[in-house]
Image: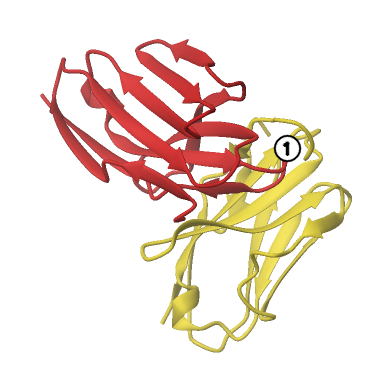
């Protein structure tokens, strides 16, 4: 969706390196979700952010929300081959109804 | 079951035929969502249910698409007179409720191919 822009569209990193994915919304956010998808599979929930300045971490993945800029970033530290996949950000604009998704970022981790 | 299940996992049909896609949400989840994922359009919202009601059908692409939910549980997405542009992966998700911020749990999807 053009309402939600993700960058970069694809990323190749060497195993052990860090990476960052950005998600920028052109409209007001109520909540911002990060999902991961492997080819041919459904979406796996990573994190949900609501408040401006909120930051959440799980294992080696950290997500932040900049409410002023309507932007979120997903950062992976010391990437591993298991981090490969498509990362999608989804915007909730109406408190629990439909999600609008970005175009996705395809991540490949080279061993 | 433990997660959202969808059936069939793959469906190949001929142009003009009707298809039905099924979604079994997580037990106790009152909200159910249908999305479509295609190469050209990415992941798009189709319709959501709160209980058996569908407050938002705005994402359904045409009147050939319809969905229903019975007993606050299973949902069926029906596509009539399928067209080649309907080919996509249809994803279903459920959440505890459709108000506030609740994680949406996704099923594995149904890959529809219209020949």
> Is residue B24 something that shows in the picture?
yes
Residue underneath mark 1: A95
Taking depth in this image into account, of B55 and B83 the one nearest to the observer is B55
Mark 1: few/some/many CA within 10 Å (<14, 14-19, 20+): some
Viewer-proximal residue, B77 or A1? A1
Query: Quick one: which chain is red?
Result: A
Instruction: Identify the residue at image location x=69%, y=41%.
Output: B94
Residue at the image position 46 percent from the left and 65 percent from the top: B88
Find chain B in the image and tell me its colour. Answer: yellow
Q: What element carries label 1?
A: loop
Q: Horizontal and vertical percent for residue A2? A: 44, 56
Expressed as whole percent of the image width and height from the top left, the position of residue B72 reads: 86, 47
Image colouring = by chain
Q: Quadrant of the C terminus of chain A?
A: top left
Q: In this view, does A104 lie to the left or right of B46?
A: left
Q: Can the viewer see residue B106? A: no
């Amino acid at each position: 969706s053009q309402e939600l822009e993700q960058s970069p569209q694809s990323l190749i990193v060497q195993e052990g390196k860090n990476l960052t994915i950005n998600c920028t919304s052109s409209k007001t956010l109520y909540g911002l979700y990060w999902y991961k998808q492997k080819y041919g599979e459904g979406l796996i929930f990573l994190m949900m952010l609501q408040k401006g300045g909120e930051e959440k971490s799980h294992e080696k993945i950290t997500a932040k929300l900049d409410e002023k800029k309507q932007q979120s970033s997903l950062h992976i530290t010391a990437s591993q081959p298991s981090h490969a996949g498509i990362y999608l950000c989804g915007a909730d604009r109406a408190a629990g109804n439909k999600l609008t998704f970005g175009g996705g970022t395809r991540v490949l981790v080279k061993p | 079951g433990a997660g959202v299940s969808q059936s069939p996992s793959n469906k190949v049909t001929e142009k003009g035929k009707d298809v039905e896609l099924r979604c079994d949400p997580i037990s106790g989840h009152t909200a159910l969502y249908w999305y479509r994922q295609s190469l050209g359009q990415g992941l798009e919202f189709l319709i959501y249910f709160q209980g058996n009601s569908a407050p938002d059908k705005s994402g359904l692409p045409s009147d050939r698409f319809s969905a229903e939910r019975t007993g606050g549980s299973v949902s069926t997405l029906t596509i009539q007179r399928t067209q080649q542009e309907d080919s996509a992966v249809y994803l279903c998700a459920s959440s505890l409720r459709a108000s506030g911020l609740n994680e949406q749990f996704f099923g594995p999807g149904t890959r529809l191919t219209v020949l």
